[in-house]
Image: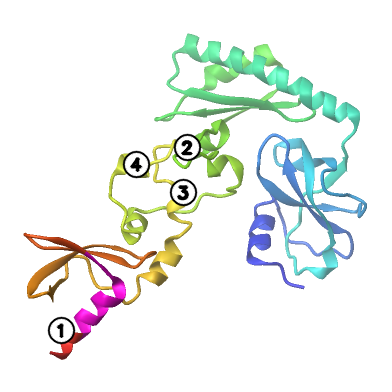
Amino acid sequence: MLLSEQEQHDIKSSESITSNKYEDGYIVSVRYISSNRSYYFYTSDDSLRVNDKVVVETVRGLELAVVIGEPKDIREFVLDLELKPVVRRATQEDEENYEINLEKAQEAYKICEECVKQLDLKMRLIKAEYTLDASKVIIIYVADERVDFRELLKELAAKLRCRIELRQIGSRDRSKIVGGIGACGLPLCCSTFLGDFDGISINMAKNQYLALNIQKLSGHCGKLICCLKYEDDEYTRLRQGLPKIGQKLHYDDKIYKIASINVLTGAVRLESPENIINLHLDEVKELIESYKEG
């Protein structure tokens, strides 16, 4: 059985390392409690069920996660990657430690914020989070320029007394972490279901006949909204064979220019210095064909 393209992508993103082949065991899909991202992990426990909480080993350390897909026999898949393992089922103590770590993370955030202010560093803190065993705290921040945080690390190490990782992220990742409500009235896609960010270009807006108003086309991150990508392929298909915007044609003994096309409804807006009319796309195509034949 071959993995789907999405499953292969998820597995490649599951913090895998060297090549290996498994003779037995299972693949299980989990989502970190602290985020909406899902990954595949290796487990020998086939009794795991959806919504079971587990402790997994990641490149950051131990993390608490929830099972979102039942285990699948690993021998059914073509797999050349070594997956990080599910360490164990989560215990009551693990869940309690997770809650304690949330409170500790808030304190770490405040301490780091004070240190940043004292050292006058040009960086904006976004979030602090501990690994499950509290052996490391990850401080996430954004900055326009490179920041020399050597002094900051010394200050934090003395006050927090654990390993410290300072992680700089971009504006899109910031929106993913912070969240918010989009122009559509729903929670941001990046903070709910998007795993990775696709490349978005202004040509996608042009392809969908959208007004090139950058302010309206930009999301909370200041970049072009991700949803421009969702229907781009369909618009590309629907635009095949359409007349060009600005093309001139004769109608009722007058010359009109195609001003806009609604590819979903088939409505075409024609403009002349004296008049504006709306025709269906089929009518416009007939006019163009008759003009060619004539």
Magenta-drawn stretch, dominant element (helix, strand or loop) = helix
- Residue 76 vertical position relative to residue 150 in the rendered view, above or below: below
Q: Give left or right: position of 288 versus 223.
A: left
Task: First in sequence, mark 2 or 4: give its number.
Answer: 2
- Residue labelled with disc 2: 170
Task: First in sequence, mark 2 or 1: give its number.
Answer: 2
Task: Report the residue that reaches farthest toward the bottom.
Answer: 293
Q: How is the image coloured?
A: rainbow
Q: Secondary structure at mark 2?
A: loop
Task: First in sequence, mark 3 or 2: give its number.
Answer: 2
Residue depicted at 73% across the width and 36% down the height: 33
Asked if the residue at tag 2 contacts the one at tag 3, i.e. Cβ–Cβ closer than 8 Å, the answer is no
Task: First in sequence, mark 4 or 1: give its number.
Answer: 4
Between circles 2 and 1, the one closer to the viewer is 1
Q: CA distance from mark 3 to mark 1?
A: 41 Å
Q: CA distance from mark 4 to mark 1?
A: 39 Å
Residue depicted at 80% across the width and 65% down the height: 21
